[in-house]
Image (tube, rainbow, N blue to C red):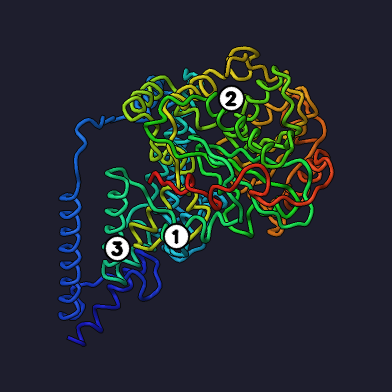
Amino acid sequence: MAARSSTRAPGRKGREDALYGLKQGDLRMHTPDDQTNDAGDFAKAWFDVAERSRAMIAGFLARQQVDPVRPVRLDPFNASGAMFEAAARLWADPAKLLEAQLSLWQGYAQLWQSTAARLRGEPAEPVIQPAAGDKRFKDAEWSESAVFDYIKQSYLLTSAWLQKTMPQVEGLDEKTRRKVEFHTRQFVDAMAPSNFVMTNPEVLRATIESRGENLVRGLEHLLQDLERGKGDLLVRMTDVDAFEIGRNIAVTPGKVVFENELMQLIQYAPTTAQARRRPLLIVPPWINKFYVLDLKAQNSFVKWAVDQAHTVFMISWVNPDETLAAKRFDDYIREGLFDALSAIERATGERRVNAIGYCLGGTMLATALAIMTARNDDRIASATYFVAMVDFRDVGDVAVFIDDAQLNAMEEDMKRKGYLDANSLHRTFNMLRANDLVWSFMVQNYLLGKEPFPFDLLYWNSDATRLPAAMHAWYLRNCYQKNLLREPGALTLDGVPVDLARVTTPSMVVAAREDHIAPWKTVYAGAPLYHGDTRFLLAASGHIAGIVNPPEAKKYGYWTNENLPEDPDAWLAGATHHDGSWWTSWDDWVGGFGDGLVPARDPGAGGLPPIEDAPGRYVRARSI
């Protein structure tokens, strides 16, 4: 037996190396030439894997309950119509189709030649390379193995061809084109070879080395996530047990000093002997929870602002259920911003505040300022808008989800429940960055069987909130779909026609250059709508990292330009780049509205007694 192995095994191993291009020991499958006891052990291991997997699936199915009134939508994102139209128009023009196919075949021919040269031991340049920052192909075998390199490049050629060809089909209107572009990208992202066991070298290696234990763990993770989502797949992005709100996240000291059925108001404890006279009110979005601005001491905007001698108040929105289904956008203005302003005056004796609105909180802040201006209410001395849109002319890929068919279906679902469930919103935003926020975790959790790594930002991202039916339907229809907020008098809220042009409050509009939720040029389009002293600041990075960028981190950078030309590209061309965090630049600006110094204020020492310690009850209620 040993002699036969010495003559046959090298030839087999040589063929395996030619096929896979692997180093000895990597991905080496057991063959009939292996010793009998090894083969038997391997078979027993895989039989055990199959049995344990069957038992887990059976147990999961036995625990499931079917919701008889839950609607089943075969095309929840209304993609089929747009994709069918694009395909029909492509096939209707044979010359264009042949031209497109020829370009793809030419790429394949070059790839075949390159791969053949590698198999002959000759040097060969790649035909196509992954984009910079594409983490799917970081494993060394994607480049060192001729076979996996071929799989990788073949996928990249095909995906690039699809993403170029489908959206450029002639005759598509702009909305259909954008939908085709988005769903084509979703398709090619889903079909990446890195997402499958047999075409991912890292997964294959882990499967062979662990004899399938990674897949058993992955199946267990999959069933747990399905059970947690009550039938919807909620992919865990982080170790949710590693964090506890108020213990190691959202820990800046303070007190809840006011509450109503929509929000709690937190006043944070001072860290300086003196504070600026004018308090700082932060209005976060109610689509997410406020503690993205208070994750931990090292990156907490709240703590940093307190350390700069601001008396900081934070609105913590309730996580609504069906009892709040009828709450509207103007209810959030009245019971959120207006009640907070009144409470701050009672707590500090100060009538005027500096205000920050983040994302939807910024949209609401601008709308409220238009109402306040019409009523000669000047309680907000300055307004800062973090990645907040008021002109929704181009909302990026989010527009794909805002057609009549999808809004009608969403409204029917919300009418049945009384709210938009957190799972739907969480899934939609994750699709905007599917490779980073969906597929990478599926590979790590389900194929490699790894436990998610503790990460505070991803914990926050998974802590999604529900939205009241009436409010969300109004917001999507009037802002996203019809873009009425920018039109003077087109909307009436709290009994007042809304006209942003009447707002003269000094304003700083902050956008993020790589923002996929509030595109920076769309945020910029809202800045000229205000008629006060308005400044625009562009941060590097995205919707969260561009805002949560503490000075100590020395990351990213930002651009400033005192002029506001109509064209955002012209603004950027004339802008000055600065290294580091924009927080200090904002603090210099808002300091002009601080109105001097007073002794620091302890929460509860004024006219509002403490209700409970920060971060309060409302933020602890989880939807998922």
Q: Secondary structure at mark 2?
A: loop
Q: Could you tell me the amino acid type at mark 3?
A: Arg
Image location of residue 118, percent across then percent down:
45, 61
Judge the density around disc 2: few (<14), some (14-19), many (≥20) Cα neighbours within 10 Å: many
Residue 392: assigned label: 2
Asked if disc 1 and disc 2 are in contact, CB closer than 8 Å, the reply is: no
Q: Residue at x 52, y 62 (%)?
A: 123
Q: What mark, if any, has residue 407 been given in the picture?
A: none
Q: CA distance from mark 1 to mark 3?
A: 25 Å
Q: Which percent across, then down, holds residue 143? A: 47, 61
Kindly check if marks 3 and 2 are in contact, taking CB atoms under 8 A apart as contact: no
Q: Which tag, 1 or 2, sits closer to the chain's start?
A: 1
Q: Earlier in the sequence, mark 3 or mark 2?
A: 3
Q: Residue at x 53, y 17 (%)?
A: 482
Is any atom of residue 301 visible in this view? Answer: no
Q: Are marks 1 and 3 in contact (CB under 8 Å)?
A: no
> CA–CA distance between discs 1 and 2?
42 Å
The image shows residue 522 at horizontal and vertical percentages of: 63, 29
Horizontally, is 456 left or right of 54 in the view? right
Amino acid identity at mark 1: Trp
Can the viewer see residue 324 in this picture? yes
Who is closer to the viewer here, 576 or 604?
604
